[in-house]
Image (spheres, grey):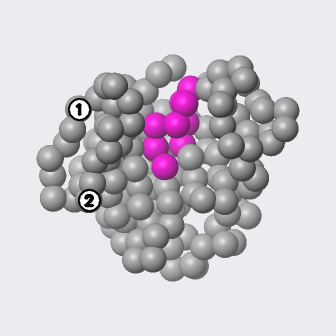
Amino acid sequence: MAPWICPDCGRPLGRKKQSHECASGLTLTEFLATQPVAWHATYQAALRALHEIGEIVIDPVDIGILIKRKGTFCELRPKKAAVEISFKLNETLDHPRIRRVLKSSTHRRAHFVWLRGPEDVDDELCAWLAEAWLSSPV
């Protein structure tokens, strides 16, 4: 899982002395307290689905929730109109639900989907998240 904990910020990272910004680590409860109550069920549905896929590390920070195996493969971030989930895959998905795709490394693409409610965490999204989990480094 996370082989190194930053001694300065206490966050779990993928490798020793990994470059990162020492963002304030939060508990999930602390993070959710900063979010609209209407979105709590959406965050919880996404996290429940990710836990069902496999072993993960949840790293809430000020800007959102980072989901990791060895490194971050998925993020949940608040937006004005929705909770945005992003996940990394080795190929580019072309689907109407994908709002944008960014190249995150030579072989990885980050895909962004808006979650407007817990019902958006459906079988289709869970399949994409499972693929992102399976293709992420261990």
67 vs 41, nearest the viewer: 67
90 vs 105, nearest the viewer: 105
Q: Residue at x 41, y 61 (%)?
A: 84
At mark 1, the secondary structure is: loop
Q: Is residue 103 left or right of residue 10?
A: left
Residue 72 seen in the figure: yes
CA separation in Å, label 2 and label 1: 15 Å
Residue 132 seen in the figure: no
What is the count of numbered marks?
2
Q: For residue 31, which quarter of the picture?
A: bottom right
As displayed, is residue 58 above or below residue 84?
Answer: above
Amino acid type, callout 2: Arg
At mark 2, the secondary structure is: loop
Q: Which residue is mark 2?
A: 99
Residue 65: image location, x then y, percent? 58, 53
Q: Residue at x 43, y 27 (%)?
A: 136
Residue 78: image location, x then y, percent? 50, 67
Q: Residue 110 colored magenta?
A: no
Q: Which mark is residue 91?
A: 1
Please tell me whether the stretch drawn in magenta is mainly helix, strand or loop: strand
Label 2: few (<14), some or many (≥20) within 10 Å?
Answer: few
Magenta region: 67-75
Q: Is residue 114 left or right of residue 68?
A: left
Q: Earlier in the sequence, mark 2 or mark 1?
A: 1
Q: Residue at x 70, y 34 (%)?
A: 12
Q: Residue at x 21, y 38 (%)?
A: 92
As displayed, is residue 78 above or below residue 16?
Answer: below
Amino acid type, callout 1: Glu
Quadrant of the frame with the N terminus: top right
View extreme (right): residue: 7
